[in-house]
Image (tube, rainbow, N blue to C red):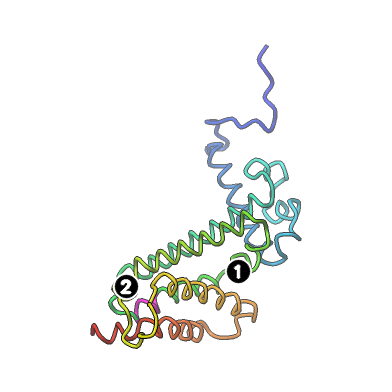
Amino acid sequence: MNAEISPATPVTGRKYRGVSNETRVAERRLKLIEAGIELFGQQGFHQTTVRALCSKAGLTERYFYESFENTEALFKAVYLNLVDDIRNRILLAIQDVSAENSAQFARAALTAFFSYIQNRPTSAFVLVNEALGVSREMSGLSLQTLNSFVDLLLVLGSPLLQRKPENVSSFSFDPTLISAALVGGTLNMAGRWAADGFQHPLEYVVENASAMFMAVLKQNATRKQ
């Protein structure tokens, strides 16, 4: 007699209405991530239940545990999904902009970032507010992610950041520390903008963030033009 296959047992390769099981699992996982972005951002991680997430995604709890062990596992997937989206948007925005043109470079990257935050308001609360209060592991991931953007800035802005500005004479100019300040400041600016209900226009926020970057980069940009 053949062993009975339980409803929870994944059957790879089987198709339903022309869609493979793997594809359907991926689709359900994405629905849960989208639900997580909304609920974690609206009501917080600790106030969000599996039942609420499944209701938002239009799925049963069985399908939640098909992809995630618990709500923290989903939060991590949500966080990484947002980070990857933002990184890709920034890289796309600056792909044709030379870092030698510091003003244009900063504006393109910052516009891509703040546009994403404005279009997905809950993303700011997930990235800025909730990520640090979930668990020690998530706090570590948040710091690791912040450092990855610092490294990205160091690479993309190396023509300017690796050279000491003309007006710096009394201390050692450290590109890594300066980049960390720029990335952290930008993230916190986004959190404040979202918390205030996006009262200021996008252009206003980009201008203010650009001023922070140009305070560091302007001297070198002037020297090279």
Q: Quadrant of residue 109?
A: bottom left
The kind of secondary structure the magenta stretch mainly shows is helix
Q: Position of residue 35 (x, y in %)?
A: 65, 57
Q: Amino acid at mark 1?
A: Val
Q: Which residue lies under the disc numbered 2? A: 162
Q: What x and y, as percent, mark residue 190?
A: 56, 76
User: Mark 1 to mark 2: distance in Å?
Assistant: 28 Å
- Determine crowd level at label 2: few under 14, some 14-19, many 20+ residues with C-alpha closer than 10 A: some
Q: Secondary structure at mark 2?
A: loop
- The image's mark for residue 128 is 1
* Residue found at x 42% / y 68%: 90
Q: Position of residue 123 (x, y in %)?
A: 59, 66
Magenta stretch bounds? 103-108
Would residue 184 be counted in the magenta stretch?
no
Q: Quadrant of the N terminus?
A: top right
| Amino acid beneath label 2 | Gln
Q: Nearer the viewer, residue 22 or 97?
A: 97
- Give the residue displayed 62% in from the left and 43% down from the top: 67
Residue at 54% x, 62% y: name it.
Answer: 143
